[in-house]
Amino acid sequence: MPPTDAATTTATPTTAAAAATTAAGSAAPAAASLSLATDPQLGPIVVDAQGFTLYLFTKDTSTTSVCTGGCAKAWPPADVTGPPTVGAGLDQTKVGAAAQADGTMQLTYGGHLLYRYAEDVTAGQTNGQGEAKLWFAVNAAGAQAGS
């Protein structure tokens, strides 16, 4: 089997909640804010309740995002309403939410602000991994995956 490009690999959610998708207008079952999925190249990575890969931005040095404007369009913050929760394999003490200038609460894990990548169009994609050598999926320990 030929090797796959890490930028187009698909992670497989390890929980049904992470993989839950709904038809328009129907309600999804309650899901953890963060879950683990297994990516064939990166191993276990953190995903949101819809199964989308979550990334950290190495230029963030605090809980205030430095990704604004066009950056935030390409890398939307992973916002949360209510208390964030984690699925199996993740540490509840590592999850949090940080208030941002626009009044939203952005998910954090392991002290890192979390983002989605606009070019991950289906759950489980890791197209943002290593982008500009600044963006990395997050592993269960709260560090950058693949390092």
Image (tube, helix red, strand yellow):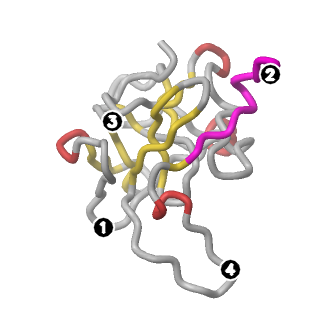
| Mark pair 4, 2: CA separation | 35 Å
Q: Residues within 10 Å of mark 4 (few under 14, many from 20)?
A: few
Q: Earlier in the sequence, mark 3 or mark 2?
A: 2
| Mark pair 4, 1: CA separation | 24 Å
Task: Specify the amino acid type for callout 1.
Answer: Gly
Q: Which residue is mark 2?
A: 1
How many numbered discs? 4
Most distant residue in the left direction: 93
Q: Which numbered disc, 4 or 2, marks the residue closer to the eye? A: 2
Does residue 135 appear to the left or right of 16 in the view shown? right
Q: Which numbered disc, 3 or 4, marks the residue closer to the eye? A: 4
Task: Specify the amino acid type for callout 3.
Answer: Thr
Q: Which quadrant: the N terminus?
A: top right
Q: Earlier in the sequence, mark 4 or mark 2?
A: 2
Most distant residue in the right direction: 2
Q: Are marks 3 and 1 in contact (CB under 8 Å)?
A: no
Residue 57 covered by magenta stretch: no
Q: Which residue is mark 1?
A: 82
